[in-house]
Image: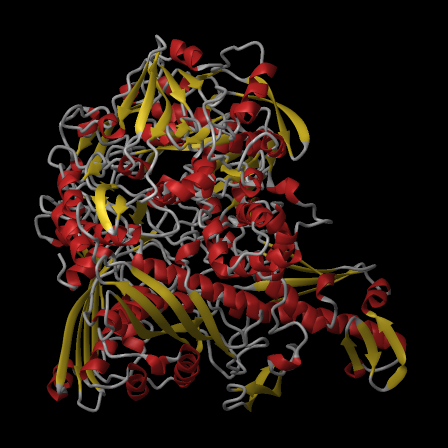
Amino acid sequence: MKKSKDKSVRYSKSGKGISRRGFLKGAGLTTVGTVALTGGILSDVHAEERTNREVLGPDAVVISLKINGRVRSLAVEPRTTLASALRDHLGLTGTKIGCDRGACSACTVWLDGKPVNSCLTLAVEAVGKEITTIEGLGSEENLHPVQEAFIEHDASQCGFCTPAMVMTAAHFLKHNPNPDLEEVKVALRGNFCRCGTHPNVFKATIAASKKM
Amino acid sequence: MDKKKIKFPYGIPGHNLSEVEREIPADEPPAWPVNEKLKYVGKPVKRYDALAKVTGRARFTADVRLPGMLFAKFLRSDTPHAKITRIDIRRAERIPGVYAIHIIKDIDGNYPDVKYAGQAIAAVAASSLEIATEAVKKIRVDYDYKPFVVDVEEAMKPDAPVVFEKEIEAKEDAGDVGVTYEGTKASGNLRGPTTSSFYGGPRGDLDKGFKEADMILEHTYRTQVQTHVPLETHGMVVDWKPDLVTVYASTQNTKNFRDEIADYFEIPRSQVRVISEFTGGGFGAKHSAGIYGPVAAILSKKTKRPVWLMLDRKEEHISAGNRPNSIHYLRIGVKKSGELTAIKQVSHGTAGVGLGAGVGRIVQAMYQCPNFTTAQYDVLTHAGPGAPWRAPGNVQGAFGLEQAVDEIAYKLRKDPLDYRDIIDKSEIRKLERERGAELFDWDKRKAPGSDKGVLKKGMGVAQSTWPRFVHLDSTAEVRLLNGGGIEIRSAVQDIGTGTKTILAQVVAEELGVPIDDVNVLIGDTFFPNGPPSGGSVVTGSITPAVRNAAYKAKMQLLEQVAGKWKSDVSNLRIADGIITDSKDSSKSMTFGDALKGMRTGQIIAVASRSDDYGGFKQEWGLAYGDLGSVQFAEVTVDTETGFVKVDRIVAAHSCGRPINTAQVKSQINGGVIQGMSYALYEYRAMDKETGMMMNTGVDNYKMPFAMEIPDIDIVLIEDYGGRSSTDAYGIGEPANIATAAAIANAVYNAIGVRIYELPLTPDKILKALKKI
Amino acid sequence: MHKFSWYEAGSVEDALAKVNATVSEIVGRKPNNSSVVFKAGGVDLMDLMKEGLVNPETIVSIKSIPGLDKIEYDDKAGLRIGANATLGEIENNEIIKEKYLALHQAVAEAGTAQLRNSATLGGNLAQRTRCWYFRSIHHVCFRKGSGVCYAQHGENEFHAIINNSKCASVHASSVSTALMAFKAKVVIMDSEGKKKEVEIGDFFVHPETDEKRENILKANELITEVVIPPVTTGTKSHYIKYVARESHDWALADVAVTLEMTGGKCRRAEIVIGAAAPVPLRLDEPAKALEGHSINEKLAKKAGDIAMRNATPLAKNAYKIPVFRAIIKRAILKAV
């Protein structure tokens, strides 16, 4: 996330007619000339770093994952999902499995700062990326404002969807610090809650935005 | 037992509040005033376990990881009806990492016949879930295929394939003591009919009633099968040790779960410990250990390792419960004045291979009508078994009844609210209608179908009744620890309803201590029996028990303090954690210091739910009176595309003395949203040709997400009755009953055509509008 | 999921040298089948694998290929979107929002935000149908070679209403509905390094042509990018996805419209609908009805009516006809 932003800014110095706002979003385009912006350069760097291309598996291989700022080594098969690596191998069970098909988003984690379904991501694919889970969002002593607001507004019932709901809301507020109700609904629309806690989740998200 | 007479608040504040005198057991606490005068009770106190939930620390059953733990996976049938002729597990056994395979057999050692697609046949325990899943695929099952039927109307035909040749017995149903079915009367796939409930049997003379009627309304209402979809699926982790079987279970009934496991293995119940720290939703489906409970235990026993067995989403949809569908016929006689003269009710529904597909008691109980009969049939089909679901039967029943009443009101040219004033004698619902209508702006309602343009708005109302159930086997222990510490212990579980929080509130209120000083240890059968989280019984059952226990413990502590102060215990007061003597202002001590000065290491007091005050003996768990609700819905219907959007709901409810207003409102939100989902989106799609459920995901089994959520406003009415030391009742089920009917009535108001079948999909709307 | 080996390709050539099968070719094949297939975002492949429908022996990740995720725009050449660009990146691209509104709308409505951060454009085009009979391991349907389409007399509420007599599945990519309206071309490279550009309408394969595949890709081919011609300043577009629930859902019906407007009149129109037939459908006659006229409600309605003239709905999906009529009309009016 940070890297690509730097790169975009760097590029913008030589570009013409480039919208700075677009660049900061990491997805801008210039209308003049042909410019690549969405990660090509970063991919090159990544490619250079990797030397020995080899086929991994099918049995377990040792990989390192950077999770919540800490590098953790673990042995996984290529078929091991990131969700399973977190939950079964590393004991980080705040990330839940709800549908195991990317439809309920209970498994939401951030990969390089973006929310993804860890049930549809392989652990081997997450190598070299920054993984953030609910355990790394805030500590019990130092809660993230979204966590505080969720407590304040009773935004959990059974609580099974809550960690992912918090992760999604926290990511959203980074990019939209002052949302209205409709924007909050759009942002959270991928996360399933069967208890029907949504009204309080919306309230909490808006309340958190005011604290951030 | 010694008794004492005390006065309790009675009635509704701001409406008709008075007092009532009750004779109560002498060791129970004095009456609380109305909520306004209390510190913790009746307040939106923060959820006890909210911190654990928002940080991901909350450990659900699916999250339990024990040393050496194995993962188990079921093999399930891929055919709806068959005799199993052979099972070959040799290829599965050879896979490295496979520890044990259990093949399910009946009591005679035979493979049970397959009765629905997705029935469990065997289970594998392996070192990882991936390996267990792989091994399951390697088990070969040979079937002798048989004809099947999954459609309720097909199953009712005389030549339909029969699901059970023998009579089956209604299994014990911990979810709802009110659904009555007489399952043993059999004919083909029909069971029943049930003709009575605890409200009694048929009443009056139906023929006479219809003769007196000026108008007769007659319709058949249809509802669909709905699956529970708790986000955490059913499952458990079993750690079998010879002297103690520890079970971590995703359950709404720890005690029942323990009993089922112990009884299955014929071991003392004291040798089974069920722990449910957090349960990821249940909604009625998680009362039993089911088949997965014993299977996981067998695998753990066999392998001498802990075994994790959670269902996957598909298994959950197919095999772990559903709200049965209904074909609900109503014939209602009405006088010009609006009075009801007769109601004839006949229903058929399928709970698949299970029973319990009635339409509840709501038609029998809600309105004044002297002549009434019901005949509720179960229809067996080759489909997954039903399970209780928030107000079993009554949600289906309400969809028919409340549309019928709405239709009668329109036919009589009466406002549906005014019309209910004629036929509904409930005081609380009358008030809910008034306050709800005001908040909702009911007066802005227009004539049916009168909106011009493509988008038509409509308003509708529906109401519900739910009995006040309580569960006498509800016990709580309060412990005061020398040196500091207040603990509540009970086996009662918190499935997201907020049980932990309300227990802490009640005890903090009773002891006069800060709520953060109270520790709640529940969801463990090592503690005294708690009620099931079903029938909306928890709050009404466990809060009086815990208050009474806290009172007893407090009195023991105060006796000791009074002894030291040479005062009388009746002079002592506790507020904000300070004990004072009302007769001697020089005497003061913190609650903490009192704990430090205790003569013994601890004070333990235990109390159970007693009968309702006022001489009402509990029968079938039934307590005084009923819980009313009135819900209002506003919808927008796109008449070109058939798309229905619920814009707004106003839900007016009562639950006696609300203990935690925030949590009560959360549950009402949940009931409304699930009701909306039932009204518009959900249904189980069964393929008739192959007998399989097709929409087993979260993407294709449609349920609402954020964008679908309407604005929900709640009217919560305190309603005191002096019935127990807390006078509180639950809200989970009442919140879910009226929503779908209110939405259906709003859709009628929008488009001017009534739809008698759920869910209200674009297909049905467009057909009603004759666009197809 | 069955065990598989994993390889991260360094280049398109590297990837093509390794791969020996398309995902479609291995549907229903038992494990240990020596197959080597591509994976990009993996949203669809993972789903197929978890269902047990495909069991590749080796997966070649193409996400690791540098430069395959570029989004480039040039007034003359138009828009080029690398196959590895995620839907999330496309959604957030300001130029696309400005010039190719219908594409932006289609992408923004595809799946959830979480999925869009993983799903790539190439994967979206190559994904398999969501027909629940196809997705069921227990149903050997027409697309799996049995000749039996269970949807014909089964649970067909989400199925096709046009060209549906043999197989009633609908293509799952709603993004392609918009791409087709912009006359996108799919750039495909083969293992010999040859590139070809294929009109997106020719990319999809109807089941009556070949029931086992939904696109023309062969085992030795890879989508490298999608090229979209530049749009004239007068070009307007709009996309509507009609769903059971707005939060996120597979389309019950969707439509993309592009209109080239000059002097208040429609010079050229493209109307494409999805979830109507096994492949996205370009509606020539309804589009012609608009050309040369100024757009009004009557005309827009006419286009919708013409579009549904030849529909052959199944027992449970006739509702799609009025829905398509309505959304075609609305998309045309919104586009103007």
User: B9 or B615, which lies in front?
Assistant: B9
Closer-to-camera residue (B162/A100): A100
The correct choice, above or below, for C89 with respect to A73 in the image is below
Q: Please give left or right for residue B521 compared with residue B602 in the image.
A: left
Coloration of the structure image: secondary structure
Q: Is residue C283 left or right of residue B683?
A: left
Horizontal and vertical percent for residue B718?
52, 80
Residue B301 seen in the figure: no
Q: Quadrant of the N terminus of chain A?
A: top right
Q: Nearer the viewer, residue B167 or B141?
A: B141
Residue at 63% in and 47% down: B55
In the drawing, does residue C208 fall left or right of residue C125? left
Number of marks? 0
Q: Residue furthest right?
A: B586
Residue B664, image x and y in percent?
52, 68
Splitting the image into 4 quarters, where does residue B295 fall?
top left
Viewed as shown, does residue B140 lie left or right of A179? left
- Residue sitting at x 49%, y 41%: B236
Residue A142 sits above or below residue B198 on the image: above
Picture coordinates of residue B18, whole percent (x, y): 55, 91
Residue A64 in the image: x percent, y percent?
A: 62, 23
Q: Visible in this render: residue C29?
A: yes
Hey, which quadrant is residue C188 in on the image? top left
Judge by depth and name the residue closer to the eye, A38 or B294. A38
| The C terminus of chain A lies in quadrant | bottom right
